[in-house]
Image (cartoon, rainbow, N blue to C red):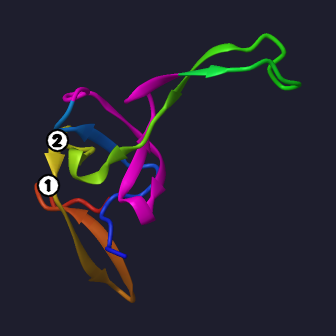
Amino acid sequence: MTKLKIKSGDTVKVIAGDHKGSEGKVVRVLRDKNKAVVEGVNMVSKHTKPSAQNPQGGIVKKEAPIHISNIALVDLKTKETTKTGVRKEGDKNVRFSKKSNQVL
């Protein structure tokens, strides 16, 4: 498995594809598929049959995963996309933004 630089809870921006330019928070990261589910981005319609949980059935909107290469981390200070690095502070490794040098 590859090391992913994006974790759940990060704010990201879509940099390629149909949803280019939209921002959202990472809900879940699928490490084995190199994909992430971003809140409010890549919404798909799913047709559902009536069931006990959903007696009406019908069309349900839900977020679909988007590939990691199509999203970039947003720096909280500058509100622009940034790359990340890892450095040691004391005895812990912390992620930091390469643009603003702030700890993420």
Q: Is residue 36 magenta?
A: yes
- Mark 2 lies on a secondary structure that is loop
- The amino acid type of the residue labelled 2 equals Thr
Is 85 rendered above or below residue 71?
Answer: below
Q: Residue at x 37, y 76 (%)?
A: 1
**x, y percentage for residue 63?**
48, 32
Q: Is residue 68 visible?
A: yes
Q: Which residues are magenta?
A: 18-45
Does residue 101 appear to the left or right of 27 in the view shown? left
Q: Is residue 74 visible?
A: no
Going by the picture, which residue comes out furthest to the right?
A: 52
Contact between marks 1 and 2 (CB within 8 A): the answer is yes
- The amino acid type of the residue labelled 1 equals Ser
Is 59 rendered above or below residue 64?
Answer: above
Q: Is residue 19 magenta?
A: yes
Q: Residue at x 20, y 33 (%)?
A: 17
Other-residue count near label 2 (Cα within 10 Å), few / some / many at <14 / 14–19 / ≥20: few
Quadrant of residue 95 in the image?
bottom left
The residue identified by callout 1 is 100
- Mark 1 lies on a secondary structure that is loop
The residue identified by callout 2 is 78
Is 72 rendered above or below residue 101?
Answer: above
